[in-house]
Image: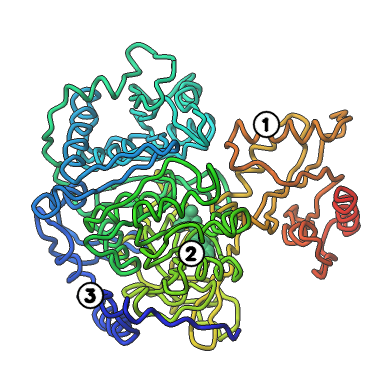
């Protein structure tokens, strides 16, 4: 694995927060020597406490751990109020609409907008500390206000990505027992309006815990209003006071839930709490992006995913940065849009997903040359392994071979980055997440908890709790323990396993190789095969189904479904049947889970105990020779039948 190494830009390193690998090592040594001292000192220095904490870490009920016990704070104060002395007229959020409409919101304006929003939720809707509020919003500033307003009054927000269907939204509303939904009438995408409110109406049909719906009128669409339930944000906000006292929150009170896919069952409500989460969001912003006071930072994620939470809203605002929110898509009106915006706003840090880089590369290779990208200092990627050609293009065409690429590895559950280069310190290698961040005890282990040898694939684990780690799965303690602490033990103690595989090279660099479980990563979106299978099974003609991931040039992975139809289904037209199946997926989950390939097969490869051998199905989907031992299958001949069916579908 001898790869090219790119040293940090010397000029950049001079003023970076972490300037070289010695400084990195010193920090990591400090954490190893005195773990609680390390975290305690940062928590004291970085966070605005209403009451100080008395204990840094309580592991007595591990894996249920507590950080900064006794401490009281409010995350909205950390993100807004504390900046009002020195940054009140600084841009907090720069909003660029799909159609090029712009808004600059200063910290003082953000303070007013969030306070009014908080008063609205509290006074008009009766939202109290601990209540769950579902946010189903487009990428508009009101989404950020809604999050921070919840934080201000101590309500727990649960954002549902706007691409999820009514069914998926309903499931999440019910699981979280949410009493309020915040949405918008719609938004714009590729210069066309799209609707969100009708999806909420559909989700709220029948029995739900929701009492009130708040609608931001972004598009001015004609939407249905249910009297006594639906209210216009634009109307109610006019009457709200600009001051709302922040709720005093315990360091370990929940801050938000975010549903994500696991390898089994329905999506899990990942719970993050106050102090630990915001501390690491801020520290990683400072270390990994090294944003300076006058910089403009842009992360292209959606607030519906964890990246949008930590690196569009909470992290940048906690450190007092200027963060761009973009409503549109990177390829509209053409694949030069992001580069045009970089030039226009003089963006200094740009953070996106490999899928976007691949699309922009493929459809607009020469676009970057048309714009002045000289403001860029740090480029980031997240969400899936990036391939070396895309990395190279990003480094050269976008970064002008002078910007560090931070390949940040993390997950919804980790709250913030855990393995990533530091732009002023780490010599980088293409498509490599490099080293654990200071304070994070990340190691690649084998199933017995031993550190793997160089070049040997192992399991990406974190051996000590860290402040921004998941605190639980909403309403399911047992699933939390089983999902993350069931597989690997080190020195007899269960450690956190991410679900990803990884490899060390000869210099100790970590490369993430992808999920080792039944989770597919489609365009950086996590998709549980079990979830997609459950959706497909709702189609009345389907007897059995198995879903696997298949490498995809742009999306990283695509969804490949093997379906056994019921013998009496009488399906004559397979093309129509595929359409019907995708319709069910659209209804149950949303467009993001549509299948790239659907193949009808007479049976699935199962062991005698009935377990589907997905590994075989993955190999067939990739067109690989089957080398696995298939003698344990109930019917080994099914493998050849499936392979030839897939082959004939391709012809
Ligand atoms: C994958 C997104 C390789 C990984 C922040 C992880 C990555 C899942 C990287 C989490 C990376 C994330 N290199 N793979 N730099 N970053 N992943 O919860 O499989 O939406 O487990 O969080 O994305 O996805 P999630």
Residue drawn at 35 percent across, 57 percent down: 347
* Ligand 1 neighbours mark 3 (CB distance < 8 Å): no
- Determine which of the numbered discs, if any, sits on residue 38 in the image: 3
Residue drawn at 37 percent across, 68 percent down: 377
* Ligand 1 neighbours mark 2 (CB distance < 8 Å): no
| Residue 405 shown left or right of residue 23 in the figure | right
Measure how far apart labels 3 and 1 are at the Cα level.
52 Å
| Residue 441 shown left or right of residue 576 in the figure | left
Front tag of 3 and 1 = 1
| The quadrant where residue 427 appears | bottom left
* Mark 1: few/some/many CA within 10 Å (<14, 14-19, 20+): some
**Labels 2 and 3: the sequence-earlier one:** 3
State the image coordinates of residue 243 (x, y, percent, origin top left).
11, 35
Residue drawn at 84 percent across, 35 percent down: 574
Q: Do we see residue 494 in this rendering? A: no
Front tag of 1 and 2 = 2
The residue beneath circle 1 is 583
């Amino acid at each position: 694995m001898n790869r090219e190494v790119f040293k940090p830009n010397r000029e950049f390193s001079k003023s970076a927060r972490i300037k070289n690998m010695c400084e990195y090592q010193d920090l990591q040594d400090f954490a190893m020597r005195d773990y609680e001292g390390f975290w305690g000192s940062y928590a004291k220095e970085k966070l605005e406490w209403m009451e100080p904490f008395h204990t840094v870490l309580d592991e007595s009920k591990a894996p249920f751990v507590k950080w900064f016990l006794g401490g009281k704070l409010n995350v909205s104060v950390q993100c807004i109020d504390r900046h009002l002395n020195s940054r009140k007229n600084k841009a907090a959020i720069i909003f660029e609409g799909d159609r090029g409409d712009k808004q600059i919101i200063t910290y003082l304006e953000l303070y007013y907008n969030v306070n009014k929003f908080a008063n609205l939720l509290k006074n008009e809707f009766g939202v109290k500390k601990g209540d769950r509020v579902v946010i189903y919003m487009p990428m508009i500033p009101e989404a950020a206000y809604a999050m921070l307003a919840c934080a201000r009054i101590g309500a727990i927000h649960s954002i549902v990505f706007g691409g999820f269907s009514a069914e998926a939204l309903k499931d999440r509303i019910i699981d979280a027992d949410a009493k309020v939904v915040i949405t918008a009438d719609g938004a714009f995408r590729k210069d066309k309006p799209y609707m969100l409110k009708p999806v909420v109406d559909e989700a709220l049909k029948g029995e739900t815990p929701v009492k009130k719906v708040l609608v931001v009128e972004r598009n001015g669409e004609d939407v249905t209003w249910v009297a006594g339930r639906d209210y216009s944000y634009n109307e109610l906000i006019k009457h709200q006071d600009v001051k709302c006292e922040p709720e005093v929150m315990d360091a370990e009170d929940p801050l938000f839930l975010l549903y994500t896919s696991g390898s089994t069952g329905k999506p899990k409500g990942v719970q993050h709490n106050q102090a630990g989460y915001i501390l690491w969001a801020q520290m990683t912003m400072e270390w990994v992006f090294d944003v300076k006071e006058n910089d403009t930072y842009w992360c292209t994620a959606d607030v519906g995913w964890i990246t949008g939470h930590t690196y569009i809203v909470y992290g940048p605002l906690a450190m007092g940065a200027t963060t761009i929110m973009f409503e549109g898509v990177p390829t509209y009106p053409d694949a030069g849009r992001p580069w045009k915006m970089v030039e226009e706003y003089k963006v200094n840090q740009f953070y996106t997903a490999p899928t976007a880089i691949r699309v922009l590369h493929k459809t607009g290779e020469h676009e970057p040359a048309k714009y002045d990208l000289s403001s860029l200092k740090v480029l980031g990627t997240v969400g899936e392994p990036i391939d070396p050609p895309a990395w190279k293009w990003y480094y050269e065409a976008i970064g002008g071979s002078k910007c560090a690429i931070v390949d940040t590895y993390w997950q919804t559950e980790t709250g913030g980055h855990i393995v990533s280069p530091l732009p002023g310190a780490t010599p980088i290698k293409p498509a490599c997440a490099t080293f654990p961040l200071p304070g994070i005890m990340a190691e690649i282990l084998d199933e017995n908890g031993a550190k793997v040898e160089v070049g040997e694939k192992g399991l990406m684990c974190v051996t000590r709790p860290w402040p921004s780690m998941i605190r639980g799965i909403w309403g399911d303690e047992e699933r939390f323990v089983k999902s993350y602490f069931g597989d690997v033990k080190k020195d007899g103690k269960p450690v956190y396993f991410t679900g990803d595989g990884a490899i060390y090279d000869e210099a100790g660099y970590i490369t993430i190789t992808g999920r080792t479980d039944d989770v597919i990563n489609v365009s950086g979106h996590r998709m549980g095969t079990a979830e997609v299978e459950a959706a497909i099974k709702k189609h009345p003609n389907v007897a059995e189904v198995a879903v696997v991931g298949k490498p995809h040039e742009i999306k990283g992975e695509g969804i490949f479904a093997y379906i056994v139809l019921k013998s009496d289904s009488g399906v004559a037209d397979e093309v129509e049947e595929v359409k019907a199946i995708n319709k069910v997926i659209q209804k149950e989950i949303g467009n993001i889970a549509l299948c790239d390939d659907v193949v009808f097969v007479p049976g699935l490869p199962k062991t005698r105990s009935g377990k589907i051998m997905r590994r075989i199905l993955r190999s067939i989907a990739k067109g690989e020779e089957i080398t696995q031992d298939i003698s344990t299958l109930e019917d080994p001949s099914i493998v050849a039948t499936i392979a030839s069916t897939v082959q004939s579908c391709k012809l």
